[in-house]
Image: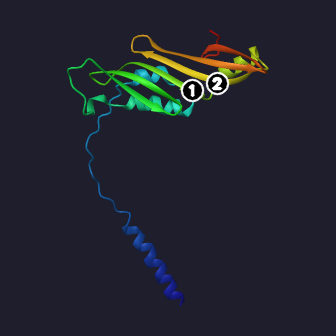
Amino acid sequence: MKKFILSLLAIGLVSQVYSQITKVEELSEVVVTAVNYKYLNQTDNKEAAVPVQMLQRKVAAYDVTTKDYYQDDYDYYTVEFYIPDGKIVAAYDADGKILRTIEKFKDIKLPSAVTKALLERFPNWDVVSDVYRVTYTDKMGAKKHYKLKLQNGERTMKVKMNEDGEFL
């Protein structure tokens, strides 16, 4: 019985040795182009809400040149992206590069700089609603600001802030 168990163990170990032989295959070359890296660098914010980051990456990865409606005759293409939390309207040139975007997101998580500035200036006020807007142009870069509606009891006020927590 002891020899039988040892022989089964030996066969099990030897059969594993043959499974480690791999074939070497040469893969085809892949070319990665970052057409809209400038847009992502300007709009990317580590503290931005997940839906904002997700939609901005979809806009950057969208390739207008592979779509059925694409023709070389047009100077630019306008494409709209929607999610329940917001939308982005992007204009692409004939090469698929982003020329400009208009972005609007409602009731998203505020960055820590904005939250900290609000707590310092308006300590007893609550944020009832917020709108995050981004306007991006290829030449000017991205401008980001928040429109906030604050409430303290029955009093309400509207405040504009940039992403760094500075009041506008």
Mark 1 lies on a secondary structure that is strand
The residue shown at (49%, 78%) is 9
Location of residue 136 (image quadrant): top left
Can you give x and y, in whole percent of width and height, for residue 143 in the image? 51, 14
Residue at the bottom extreme of this rendering = 1
User: At label 2, which amino acid type do we have?
Assistant: Ser
Front residue of 72 and 95: 72
Percent across and percent down for residue 83 are 48, 33
Tell me the SS state at disc 2. Answer: strand
Q: Is residue 58 toward the left or the right of residue 97 in the image?
A: right
Tags 1 and 2 touching, CB below 8 Å? yes
The relative height of residue 42 versus residue 84 in the rendered view (above or below) is above
Query: Looking at the rendering, which quadrant does residue 98 occupy?
Result: top left
Badge number at residue 129: 2
Task: Identify the residue shown where x is 50% and y is 87%.
Answer: 3
The residue at which mark 1 appears reads as 106
